[in-house]
Image (spheres, rainbow, N blue to C red):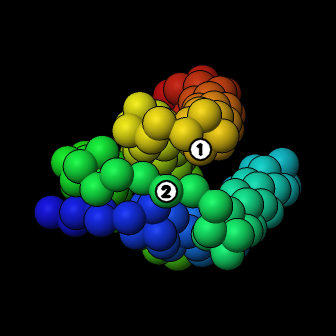
Amino acid sequence: MKEFNSIDDILDFAINAEQDAVDFYNQLSEVAKTKDMKTTFVQFAQEEIGHKTRLTKIKKEGIFQLEKQEIADLKIADYIVSAKASPDMSYQDALVLAMKKEKAAFKLYLELSSRVKNAQMKDLFLSLAQEESKHKLRFEIEYDEFVLREN
């Protein structure tokens, strides 16, 4: 299990997770079945780039400090979805995978927000959690409209 010893460790993890999300949404945009979902996946990739940029800026400025014991027990495996998008996956599977990834990201940012004392960092993580929750809802709506109504 990954242990974090500093805010930089947390930020590095979150930055890498955001890059993974960018790559994931770019892959999904290539296999999207509708123009609207292709556009949505591209927009989500852009939003994830924005998240990564925010986190990178915070890390570069280095203005936040955390006590080591505040962040040592995050159970990171609970927040990782290991499946990868593939060109031959069904649209239904792509939507399910996207929902799971967004839920995992939401839980991660919510947990990180509960672990920090700094109000600005707490607000940042809560804001990121809210954005991930909105993404999940968008995929749930698409799943309902595209998958459930066809079956």
Residue carrying label 2: 65
In the displayed structure, 68 sits above or below 16; it is above
Q: Quadrant of residue 9?
A: bottom left
Question: Which of the two residues, 127 or 138, is positioned nearer the viewer here?
Answer: 127
Q: Position of residue 125 (x, y in %)?
A: 57, 42
Amino acid on which the number 1 mark rests in the picture:
Met
Say if residue 47 shows up in the picture: yes
Q: Is residue 59 above or below residue 36?
A: below
Q: Residues within 10 Å of mark 2 (few under 14, many from 20)?
A: few
Callouts 2 and 1 close, C-beta under 8 Å: no
Residue drawn at (47%, 36%), measured in percent from left and top? Answer: 117
Under circle 1, the secondary element is: helix
Crowdedness near tag 1: few (<14), some (14–19) or many (≥20) residues, C-alpha within 10 Å: some
Residue at 15% x, 63% y: name it: 1
Which image quarter: residue 56? bottom right
Q: Check residue 23 in the rendering and tell me which mark sits there, or answer none.
A: none
> Does 125 sit left or right of 2 as displayed?
right
Picture quadrant where residue 13 is located? bottom left
Residue 72 placement, left or right of 6? left
Q: What is the CA distance from the residue labelled 2 to the residue labelled 1? A: 10 Å
Looking at the image, can residue 107 be seen? no
Residue under label 1, please give it: 121
- Furthest residue in direction left, as rendered: 1
Q: At 67% across and 75% down in the image, what residue appears?
A: 60
Question: Residue 68 versus residue 150: which sits nearer the camera?
Answer: 68
Front position in the image: 81 or 62:
62
Q: Position of residue 109 (x, y in %)?
A: 48, 42
